[in-house]
Image (spheres, coloured by chain):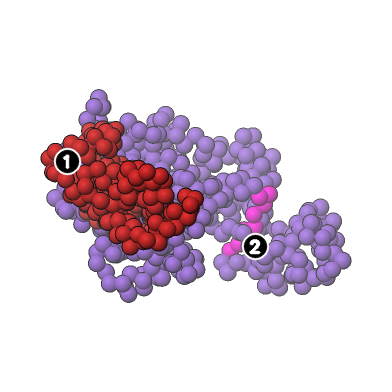
Chain colours: A red, B purple
């Protein structure tokens, strides 16, 4: 049997299992990014307003990004134990930088003269943020969330090593089996497809939210 | 309406104050222009009025109340503000931009829309522009909207920071005209900052010349042109000296040629060409039987339509660009030179043709200024 037939057989026999892992995989990535957004967007807004903090915060975010995912997960595991919580936490930390950075860039990138005009027309600081800065920065912020989600899907694939399941566990099963190439593909292809689909869909949302027509 | 008392502003890290002990009174309905070289403190002075910058010492009173004693946000909503870079909200429609301050004041939607419609008709833009976005408009149209935004809640006081500075000369010219008209009709007090003397002379009721944070001279445009306080002011108004030396010639009527060569719109092209030949000119002003200016026709138009058409009114250009006979000479002169037109028709009330000013007329004027008036009509001017 060639690899192709093997793959078809495996998928037809384990379709439901692959779907369950796919769904689980996606949820872990999405939750990590969601929590990261809740924390990062206010931080990004804050450092955009108080510029002095921005250097520190962005450096800290970059340092997290340089740590290999496996190493980071291992350390988190020591503190939080095995399972999905640890994976979601890891995705959370890796999502901080792109979201904070894009929020920061988006808000500082709003045309200074537009802000001056709005402010001089009698907007409060808060109105300036809600009515001018956020609407004009939203598409750049969405681009950050998009990057975070794609990176997160990759991070979750490694989560299988600490018992969180996900499509990564199908890949690992394939590497352990003799002639397991087809099984590896059954895990790897959906992972890649998920990342591509997430990128395309988020890109679409990003363009929809871009209210500055050019 | 507006009063500065010993106002000083010193920015941290600067050795000298940007504005030093400034005293000035502005009456209701006055159009005050602050002018001076960059860094003279004119913009700082203006921004202190709506507290974008706060004075280090001294008092600024708007309607008798110190601005520092008022809520800054409420204060800004009650004062119109226009900047050079326009600063329209790119994510809002033109209508929403006009109603910006109204929305901050929690006007209901109907009232906002009503007001936006009312305003856009003032600047002769079609109503459907209200639903467009600012980037779809030209620079001149955008700044018209910028001005309307400042007028939207009908504030008695409007601040303008070089509002027409970034526009091309022709657009700037028409916006200045429009705005001056609006101001007269609406009886607003305007504080206007510029570094363009022509603009100041054209618009101002009162010019405030500043240098190094202090007021050098305050006066009407005529005062300043005729009696500059010192050398600095003279340098600043340099360009206008030719006209200044003949202060009695101030209106277009005084220099225009009262007998322009005209043709009636019902005449044939053949008559037109004969008239051009007889009078040695290349274009004719077209009038109707009662002398109302209808347009003009030139040799090119006749040449390209001679076979096809017979009557003057069929080929004439109806773009009636004309000046009023009572308009100021210096405005007309600069406008003509800027537009590069070789002549401009002069009209009296009801668009009745009164005369024409050509480049030759201007040459005569400059000649007379330099050589004296003896050769022209015997009345020497000293």
Which residue is pictured at 28% across the width and 52% down the height? Answer: A166
Which residue is pictured at 60% across the width and 66% down the height? Answer: B351
Circles 2 and 1 on the same chain: no
Q: Is residue B316 left or right of residue B249?
A: right
Decide if residue A195 is in sight here: no
Location of residue A50 by image quarter: top left
Reply above or below: B16 against A12: above
Give the x, y percent position of residue A125.
22, 51
CB contact under 8 Å: marks 2 and 1: no
Looking at this view, name the residue that lies furthest to the top. B15
Which residue is pictured at 14% across the width and 50% down the height? Answer: B69
Q: Which residue in the protein does label 1 denote?
A: A77
Q: Is residue A146 magenta?
A: no
Q: Residues within 10 Å of mark 1 (few under 14, many from 20)?
A: some
Q: Is residue B358 left or right of residue B173?
A: right
Q: Which residues are magenta?
A: B341-348
Q: Please give the label number shown on residue B319.
A: 2
Q: Residues within 10 Å of mark 2 (few under 14, many from 20)?
A: few
Q: Secondary structure at mark 2?
A: loop
Which residue is pictured at 74% across the width and 61% down the height? Answer: B297
Give the x, y percent position of residue B292.
65, 69
Q: Main secondary structure of the magenta part?
A: strand
Q: Nearer the viewer, residue B249 or A53?
A: A53
Q: Is residue B342 magenta?
A: yes
Quadrant of the drawing holding the C terminus of chain B: top right
Quadrant of the drawing holding the N terminus of chain B: bottom left
Q: Chain of mark 1?
A: A
Q: Chain of mark 2?
A: B
Looking at this view, name the residue that lies furthest to the bottom. B110
């Amino acid at each position: 049997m060639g690899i192709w037939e093997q793959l078809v057989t495996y998928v037809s026999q384990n379709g439901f299992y692959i779907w369950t892992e796919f769904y689980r995989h996606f949820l872990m990535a999405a939750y990590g990014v969601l929590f990261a957004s809740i924390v990062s967007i206010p931080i990004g807004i804050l450092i955009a307003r108080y510029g002095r903090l921005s250097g520190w915060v962005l450096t800290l975010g970059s340092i997290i990004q340089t740590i290999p995912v496996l190493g980071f997960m291992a350390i988190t595991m020591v503190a939080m134990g095995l399972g999905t919580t640890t994976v979601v936490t890891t995705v959370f930390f890796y999502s901080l930088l792109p979201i904070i950075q894009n929020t920061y860039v988006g808000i500082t990138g709003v045309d200074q003269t537009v802000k001056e005009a709005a402010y001089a027309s009698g907007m409060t600081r808060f109105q300036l943020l809600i009515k001018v800065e956020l609407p004009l920065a939203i598409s750049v912020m969405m681009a950050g969330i998009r990057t975070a989600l794609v990176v997160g899907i990759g991070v979750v694939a490694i989560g299988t090593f600490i018992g969180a399941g996900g499509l990564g566990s199908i890949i690992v099963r394939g590497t352990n089996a003799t002639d397991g190439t087809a099984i590896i593909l059954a895990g790897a292809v959906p992972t890649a497809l998920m990342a591509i689909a997430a990128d395309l869909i988020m890109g679409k949302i990003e363009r929809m939210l871009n209210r500055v027509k050019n | 309406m507006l009063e500065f008392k010993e106002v000083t502003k010193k920015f941290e890290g600067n050795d000298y104050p940007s504005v030093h002990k400034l005293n000035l009174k502005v009456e209701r309905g006055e159009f005050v222009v602050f002018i001076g070289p960059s860094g003279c403190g004119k913009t700082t002075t203006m921004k202190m009025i709506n507290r974008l910058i706060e004075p280090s010492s001294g008092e600024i009173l708007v309607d008798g109340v110190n601005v520092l004693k008022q809520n800054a946000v409420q204060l800004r909503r009650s004062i119109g503000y226009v900047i050079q870079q326009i600063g329209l909200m790119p994510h809002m429609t033109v209508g929403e931009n006009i109603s910006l301050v109204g929305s901050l004041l929690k006007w209901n939607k109907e009232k906002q829309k009503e007001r936006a419609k009312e305003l856009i008709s003032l600047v002769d833009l079609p109503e459907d522009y209200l639903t467009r976005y600012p980037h779809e408009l030209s620079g001149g149209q955008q700044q018209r909207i910028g001005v309307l935004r400042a007028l939207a809640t009908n504030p008695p006081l409007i601040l303008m920071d070089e509002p027409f500075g970034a526009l091309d000369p022709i657009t700037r010219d028409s916006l200045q005209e429009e705005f001056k008209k609006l101001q007269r009709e609406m009886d607003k007090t305007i504080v206007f900052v510029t570094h363009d003397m022509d603009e100041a002379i054209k618009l101002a009721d009162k010019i405030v010349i500043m240098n190094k944070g202090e007021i050098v001279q305050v006066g009407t445009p005529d005062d300043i042109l005729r009696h500059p306080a010192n050398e600095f002011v003279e340098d600043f108004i340099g360009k206008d000296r030719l006209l200044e030396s003949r202060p009695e010639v101030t209106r277009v009527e005084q220099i225009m040629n009262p007998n322009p060569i005209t043709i009636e719109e019902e005449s044939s092209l053949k008559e037109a060409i004969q008239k051009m030949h007889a009078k040695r000119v290349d274009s004719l002003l077209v009038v109707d039987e009662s002398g109302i200016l209808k347009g003009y026709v030139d040799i090119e138009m006749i040449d390209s339509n001679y076979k096809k058409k017979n009557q003057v009114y069929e080929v004439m250009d109806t773009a009636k660009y004309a000046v009023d006979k009572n308009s100021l000479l210096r405005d007309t002169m600069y406008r003509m030179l800027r537009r590069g037109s070789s002549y401009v028709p002069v009209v009296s009330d009801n668009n009745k043709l009164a005369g024409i000013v050509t480049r030759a007329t201007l040459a005569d004027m400059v000649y007379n200024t330099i050589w004296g008036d003896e050769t022209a009509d015997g009345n020497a001017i000293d």
